[in-house]
Amino acid sequence: MRTRLLSSACLALALVLVPACSGSQRNAEQLELSDYHYQLAVGHYRAREVPYALRELLTSIDLNADNTSALYLLGFIYQGRRDFEMAEQYYLQALGLDPELHEVKNNLGTVYLEQSRWEEAETLFRELTRTPTYMTPEHALNNLGWAQYNLGLYRDALTNFQMAVEFGPDHCLAWNNQGLTFEALDNLSDARRAYQQAIRRCDDYPEPHYRLGVIAMNVDQNLEEAVVLFQACVDAAPETGYGTRCQEYLDAIAAP
């Protein structure tokens, strides 16, 4: 229907102007229409009307297969739906058109992380951290560190988590991941400090409360402190996995 409407528009224009619509003019109209449908998709996505957003995005790339913004948002939506195969497909399409789309590359790397494809993720994030034009290197550094952590490369991981907070001091996840790495290296004093930094910057972030609560209970034998930490964890995010774990600890401590 939209193709017929475009053709009709050219035909109407031809009755007024000579010569008729050129191929380049039709192409320009298609590009403009593709961007229009992409903007509609963004509006639907922001309104959490995801099926409508997907429909508009598919229309957008039908009109212009090189619309990298539409490809990126398609990948992002499919990643949110945990359809990693489709997300990877659209991210790779976008990067094939423009290898300098650094946020797309970072998101592709997180797809690899979600699938435990640690080596592929490490390679991609290492490349991204060496890209001087990437404006938020703390994300790639943290993600590189996480791939290395899962490969057992704890010293390398720690270096990248520490660099991440140099670029982004409030990057709570990188602080928390430092804590995990210090624990893996049997350095509980530095692990505590890292978890405390994560809490200081994001007090509604449940995981560092949970981690510190476990240390307080199992290592320090300080049940009073553990209760405070587990309760803060539950208060921050009761419906999450960490909130559930913290509530289980609280119930166990309170049991006779």
Image (cartoon, rainbow, N blue to C red):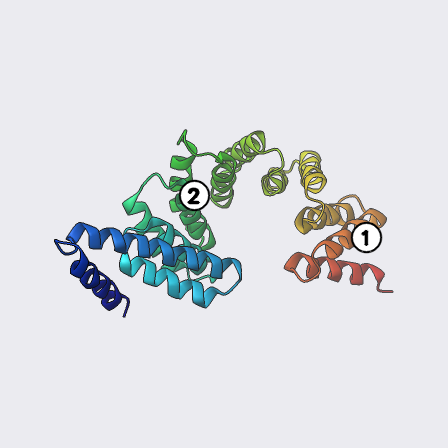
Q: Which residue is mark 1?
A: 227
Residue 219 at x, y = what percent? 75, 45
Q: Residues within 10 Å of mark 1 (few under 14, many from 20)?
A: many
- Farthest residue to the left: give it: 19
57 vs 30, nearest the viewer: 30
Residue 65 seen in the current view: no
Residue 3 at x, y = what percent? 24, 65
Q: Residue at x 37, y 60 (%)?
A: 57
Placement of the C terminus among the 4 image quadrants: bottom right
134 vs 46, nearest the viewer: 46
Q: Is 173 situated left or right of 4 in this image?
A: right
Residue 162 seen in the current view: yes
122 vs 187, nearest the viewer: 122
Query: Mark 1 vs mark 2: which is more N-terminal?
Result: 2
Q: Which residue is mark 2?
A: 103
Question: Residue flagged by tag 1: what amino acid is it?
Answer: Val
Residue 128 at x, y = what percent? 40, 36
Compute the Cα span from label 1 to label 2: 40 Å
Image quadrant assignment for residue 253: bottom right
Q: Residues within 10 Å of mark 2 (few under 14, many from 20)?
A: some
184 vs 55, nearest the viewer: 55
- Farthest residue to the bottom: give it: 1
Is label 1 or label 2 in front? 2
Q: Residue at x 85, y 49 (%)?
A: 224
Q: Is 236 situated left or right of 101 in this image?
A: right
Asked if marks 1 and 2 touch (Cβ < 8 Å), the reply is no
Please, what secondary structure does the residue beneath circle 1 have?
A: helix
Q: Is 42 situated left or right of 27 in this image?
A: right
Q: Residue at x 38, y 63 (%)?
A: 56
Please, what secondary structure does the residue beneath circle 2 have?
A: helix
Placement of the N terminus among the 4 image quadrants: bottom left
